[in-house]
Image (tube, helix red, strand yellow):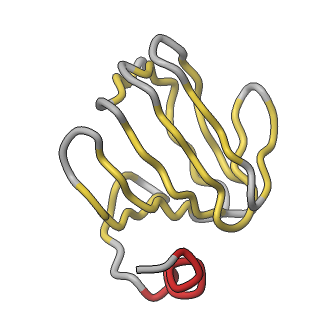
């Protein structure tokens, strides 16, 4: 698959429930994992600890955390040992890669 094909068609992929307000399409399960997360407007992910590197590319909308707001096209790196909570006021979609699972702290 070419990147242009992916950018133009990811919205058509099947999504399943991940957590309240957040749906997921798994591209690769395991370690590392690769997926698309689709946040409904107002959706949140509670405070969590990164046990490995997490890499996020915002595909649509705006994702936010305690450090700021990340619009479409933003690349976010959350190194091992960092923690944050995540939300999207307007809704968003992100391509996310987890080196290892996160640990929910709340």
**x, y percent for residue 68:** 81, 34
Q: Quadrant of the N terminus?
A: bottom left
**x, y percent for residue 43:** 58, 53
User: So how many labels did they put on this image?
Assistant: 0
Q: Quadrant of the C terminus?
A: top left
**In this picture, is 2 found above or below 20?**
below
Q: Residue at x 50, y 32 (%)?
A: 46
Q: Residue at x 59, y 63 (%)?
A: 93
Left or right: 103 in relation to 38: left
**In this picture, is 40 found above or below 84?**
below
Q: Residue furthest left?
A: 30
**x, y percent for residue 79:** 52, 21
Q: Residue furthest front?
A: 2
Q: Residue at x 34, y 22 (%)?
A: 103
**x, y percent for residue 39:** 56, 60
Q: Nearer the viewer, residue 84 or 77?
A: 77
Q: Residue at x 30, y 31 (%)?
A: 101
């Amino acid at each position: 698959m070419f990147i242009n094909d992916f950018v133009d068609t990811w919205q058509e992929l099947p999504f399943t429930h991940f957590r309240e307000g957040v749906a997921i399409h798994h591209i690769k399960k395991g370690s590392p994992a690769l997926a698309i997360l689709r946040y409904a407007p107002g959706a949140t992910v509670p405070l969590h600890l990164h046990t490995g590197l997490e890499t996020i590319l915002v595909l649509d909308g705006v994702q936010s955390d305690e450090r700021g707001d990340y619009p479409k096209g933003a690349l976010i790196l959350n190194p091992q040992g960092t923690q944050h909570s995540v939300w999207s006021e307007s809704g968003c979609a992100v391509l996310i890669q987890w080196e290892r699972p996160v640990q929910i702290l709340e």
